[in-house]
Image (spheres, rainbow, N blue to C red):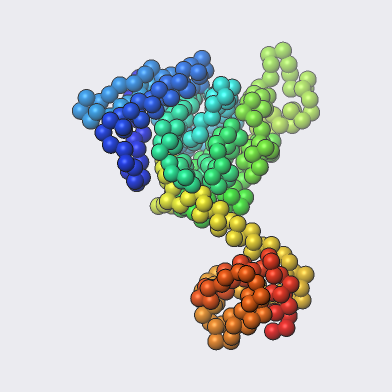
Amino acid sequence: MALKNLKEVPRNMKLLILGRMIGILMMIGMMLLWKYHERCLDSIEIIYFYGFTKDPDTLKYMVVIDYANKGNLRGNLTRIIKNNWDQKLYMLCEIISGLNSIHEQNLIHCDFHDGNILNHNEDKIYVSDLGLCQPVKSFLKEYNIYGVVPFMAPEVLRGKSYTPASDIYSFSMIMWEFTSGTPPFNNRAHDIQLSLSICKGERPEIIENTPQCYVDLMKKCWDEDPLNRPSSKEVLKTIIKWIGLPSNKKIKDIDKELKCNIMEFINAPIGHNILTTESHPQACYTSRILDFTSKKLNEILESEDLNSCIIKDLKSLDKNTSKKLNEILESEDSQTYYASHSSTGITEELDDCIIKDTNIKIDKNQPIIYVLKKIYLNTKARVVKYFKDS
């Protein structure tokens, strides 16, 4: 058996909860944790949960669970990558089977990553921490994001609720780890820039020599649209088919597609796929409250979407007009652009040409890119005319 500290109220939250209130909330969290585990106790892929205890010295609550002698999955990636595909698929089958057990109980893990998957005796896998994120999430302010960035689905980063499909996205990152031997995006800072990239469709690079059928399933699981991702049950069925044949069948007796898939795994090289990248000092694989909000993330993404919309419209204009507007709209530092062009009288002319007949109030000290964005959609014809005439 092993003891695991319950996650405490994050220190960086300004909460007016003291003394007994914290104790009450922790008890609520423990009851939820027991409730979630009780519903999944029949699954051999969920770490066995015995109950709670309290450290008499620190007075911290702890959960009592089975002991996994190899630690978490992340700490075993360099060993797992050297396994043959039969071994890898068997381990993945245990992981997705555990996740499917959770989903069959109409539950969502919400914090599914390689640190919450435990390894025992080389090949036995357990899913752990079911429900541990729930008490922490109850303390989150609106727009706060909690988790491990590389394992978080784009819709969750943007503030949507967790769903079984967001767990499947997290599983796709574990699939990728089994091909690379390293955690996803370990060479990048786990910050707002990476989150923006994930929301815009960036995924880890496909590792050479990965069987194509495996790549296809992995891509389905990390699809940007959660509705396009397969269910845990569908993924489980697919991997079971890859693992081996029923005892009464031979490879020649199965359908052509499955035969090709199985042969891909048989012929794939072992241990040649290791991706060697230096870990970034700001890569963080511990669940935490991120230092940016979903609101901020959405504001940036919506601003970029507007830029794309404007630039798309400009492609229909003549070359010189497009160049003038693109120079402003794609400027990395719009404030610098504003300062460098203010002597030309461009802002005054824009004010005369566009702003004076509208109800939009514009601060002339704003960067010109903000002015253009604010008025563009309602006064597009005037903006275009101004730049054609100037």
Say which residue appears at 77% left-offset and 70% top-offset. Answer: 316
Say which residue appears at 79% left-offset and 25% top-offset. Answer: 255
Please say if 200 is above or below 251: below
Say which residue appears at 40% left-offset and 38% top-offset. Answer: 139
- Expressed as whole percent of the image width and height from the top left, the position of residue 60 reads 28, 29
Q: List the single residue furthest toward the top.
A: 248
- Expressed as whole percent of the image width and height from the top left, the position of residue 213 reads 69, 36
Please say if 271 is above or below 333: above
The answer to whether residue 75 is left or right of residue 341 is left
Identify the image quadrant of the N terminus.
top left
- Expressed as whole percent of the image width and height from the top left, the position of residue 101 reads 56, 22
Q: List the single residue furthest toward the left.
A: 57
Quarter where residue 252 is shown: top right
Please say if 286 is above or below 374: above
Quarter where residue 355 is shown: bottom right
- Expressed as whole percent of the image width and height from the top left, the position of residue 343 reads 55, 87
Observer-nearest residue: 350 or 103? 350
Could one spot residue 23 in this view of the protein? Answer: yes
The answer to whether residue 191 is left or right of residue 265 is left
Could one spot residue 124 in this view of the protein? Answer: no
Say which residue appears at 58% left-offset and 44% top-offset. Answer: 155
Identify the image quadrant of the C terminus.
bottom right
Observer-nearest residue: 67 or 247? 67
